Amino acid sequence: MSNWHEDQEWEKEWHGNCVNSLNEELKQLVYAKKMGLKLSGDLKTPYRFDLQGKSILDIGGGAYSLLLKADNYSYAVVADPCTYPQWTYDRYLAAKITTVTIEAEALDSVEFGVPFFDEVWMYNVLQHTMSPEKIIQNAKRWGKIVRYFDWIEQGITIGHPQNLHESELNKWFGGVGKVELLNETGCTGLSYYGIFKGDYYA
């Protein structure tokens, strides 16, 4: 196991000043499609998600969460342990998205002002964490459903202290995700994704 704090510093340096984020955002559109999010383009942009009044918690959304391409949410939060340039937080503020700088393992101790969220989103995140199982527990604790995408069988490298496996993820989510080999829009590798029931599912 690598040093988690060093991994977070590596991740922060990877994103740098966050100005040229196009590559990451194009990949996020692939993640979104696999997580079952559907674009509702308008005259301004084809890259728009209409959330129809839902509340959303994005765990690990970083400096350019998919929520920045969404509207019509009742309450939106991005929780991420890294710190980014101030302008990225100003952009979230302008979009009425709350940001919380916290490790996802500690989200069971946070008071968000709501008992739960309609949806929790996690994409390309658990490879970067200390305890994927704990984070999945927290995601389910906060959501009616959890939309999830990640890479599996990638090995352990700097910035990626977890090597995720299908069987473990199925066990932790209490469901069965889809496994697919991808090679599109910069997304290359074995992926795992699905929509899973949270503790408030009804």
Image (cartoon, rainbow, N blue to C red):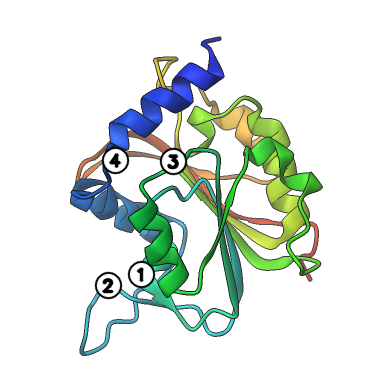
Q: Amino acid at mark 4?
A: Leu
In the rendered structure, the answer to whether residue 18 lies left or right of residue 111 reads left
Mark 3 Cα within 10 Å, few/some/many (few <14, many 20+)?
A: some
Residue position for label 2: 47
- Residue 156 lies, with reference to residue 83, above or below; the image says above
**Label annotation for residue 56:** none
The answer to which of marks 3 and 2 sits earlier in the sequence is: 2
The answer to which of marks 1 and 4 sits earlier in the sequence is: 1
**Residue nearest the observer in this picture, 46 or 169:** 46
Mark 1 Cα within 10 Å, few/some/many (few <14, many 20+)?
A: some
Q: Give me the residue at 69% from left, 36% from top.
A: 105
The answer to which of marks 4 and 2 sits earlier in the sequence is: 2
Q: Amino acid at mark 2?
A: Tyr
Quadrant of the snapshot with the N terminus = top right
**Residue reaching furthest to the top:** 1
Q: Secondary structure at mark 1?
A: helix
**Residue 196 seen from this side:** yes
Q: Amino acid at mark 3?
A: Asn
The mark lying in front, picked from 4 and 2, is: 2
- Residue 8 lies, with reference to residue 198, above or below; the image says above
